[in-house]
Image: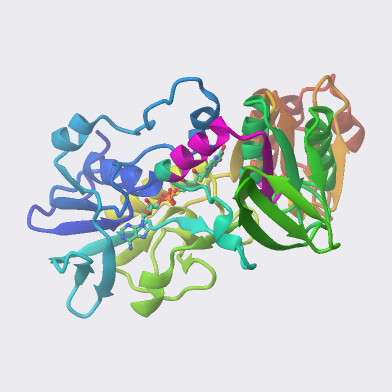
Amino acid sequence: MSEQLFSAPGEQIIIIGAGMAGGWAAVTLRQSGFAGRILLLGDEAERPYDRPPLSKTVLTLAEEPAPAYFHAVERYGELNIDFQGGARVEAIDRTAGRVRLASGKSEPYDKLLLATGARPRALPIPGGQHALLLRTWDDARRIRAALAGAKQVICIGAGVIGLEVASSAHQRGAGVTVLEAAPSAMGRALSAEGASYMEGLHRAAGIILRFNQGVMGIERHAGGYRVNLADGTSLEGDLVLAGIGVVRNTELATEAGLTVENGIVVNDRAQTSDPAIFAAGDVTAFPHPLFGRVLRLETWRHAQNHAIAAAKAMCGDATPYDDMPWFWTDQLGVNLQVAGLPADATLTILRSGKDFAAVHLDADGVVIGVTAANNPREIRAGMGLMKARVKADQEKLADPAVGLQTLISR
Ligand SMILES: Cc1cc2nc3c(=O)[nH]c(=O)nc-3n(C[C@H](O)[C@H](O)[C@H](O)COP(=O)(O)OP(=O)(O)OC[C@H]3O[C@@H](n4cnc5c(N)ncnc54)[C@H](O)[C@@H]3O)c2cc1C
């Protein structure tokens, strides 16, 4: 238990959204000394579970695994957290301090946390509804079942989700084609060099990648699906998946009159434009002190750490949130980790070791990102360089024999 910061037995905190952020916030509220009622409302049936396995082991393991829950069900009992699944919140009445559920029930709150996450963007083309989307446990089970008999899989979108599903489908023995409108893979998350490394991995495995590729429509027929392309040709597949980004679930916040700018706008303590309402995780747009701008992250580490910071802030902790952006992806047997913001870099320096590793610099030569395949040590050291705002010697950065950690204090 951490220091008791806040205690109010008669009060109620409601968390809307029982995903990663909602789950961690509930537990942290109690651990931070909140003594009132904690009501965790989620529209999915499951209690909070981990999403990363959904595009990886849930699709590839011979036996279907169970959801990877963050906390045993008994933990909610021990911590006196009232989790309600299948409970969709339809509106927030800020004047009355109440939320209204789809069931018709209404619940009062003293403080509210919005952890409503994001949903996959649907394909806005004729027949777009035939493309499967991946966000939830139910989505993953549907894709897993479809993969069982699939010989040809078409992934629309070469972002993390599209490429992870491509990798999993390949592992299951299917032929895979990835169609991407942009000129490269994972463009928002990687530098050009990182993208080209990942593209090389997929091509070496026999996965077909087609960039600058417009998709006009999807037709269903007795034998599967036909994907019509902008160049007049078409592709046949048994399974079509779309991974073309997400839409943040901001509607409740917008309708309640909170400030929303492609994400619920929060300050460095996860507080929205209403001091009684906080927001955390994928749904937010938050200021990052190190990078000096507003970020919108859709990553596991951010969802967890932002939620923990928000819960502590709701209990009175004034520490600003400054966690380093970091994500990983597992594709074709490679674990790629990315820290910082490589896509913002002016210069990328490759460290020519066994596997791909790169350090990314801004216009002033300050380290603002690190990307490394199968090398978490480089990432940890790179985070140290970023926090220290190091302008390291570029020759040393390029030399894999020079450990990045040795450059921190120079
Ligand atoms: C398939 C997949 C693989 C991933 N792999 C990786 C990875 O390898 N590495 C990595 O760093 N990140 C990965 N991520 C990202 C990471 O899982 C997310 O960033 C994280 O789950 C976000 O958590 P969240 O709680 O903010 O949002 P969510 O997980 O989206 O949770 C929000 C919850 O709120 C619910 N909700 C929304 N509106 C309402 C409402 N009105 N009433 C009640 N409930 C509501 C939603 O249904 C959902 O259950 C992956 C994500 C997915 C989908």
Residue at 21% x, 65% y: name it: 101
Q: 331 and 220: which one is in front? A: 220
- Magenta-colored stretch includes residue 231: no
Residue at 43% x, 43% y: name it: 304
Q: Does 131 appear above or below 103?
A: above
Determine if residue 354 is in view. yes
Return the x and y of residue 254 as percentages of the image width and height: 41, 76
Identify the residue at the far front of this view.
222
Return the x and y of residue 87 as percentages of the image width and height: 24, 56
Q: Looking at the rendering, which quadrant does residue 89 occupy? A: bottom left
Residue at 83% x, 57% y: name it: 233
Determine if residue 336 is in view. no
Q: Does 292 appear above or below 397?
A: below
Identify the residue at the far right of this view.
395
Return the x and y of residue 57 as percentages of the image width and height: 52, 27
Tell me the quadrant of the picture where the C terminus can be found: top right
Q: For this view, does 409 lie left or right of residue 121?
A: right
Q: Does 408 appear above or below 35?
A: above
Q: For this view, does 161 lie left or right of residue 231?
A: left
Return the x and y of residue 369 as percentages of the image width and height: 72, 43
Q: 118 and 171: which one is in front? A: 171
Q: Please provide the residue range marked out in magenta.
A: 139-160
Q: For this view, does 349 lie left or right of residue 369?
A: right
Q: Looking at the rendering, which quadrant does residue 177 occupy? A: top right
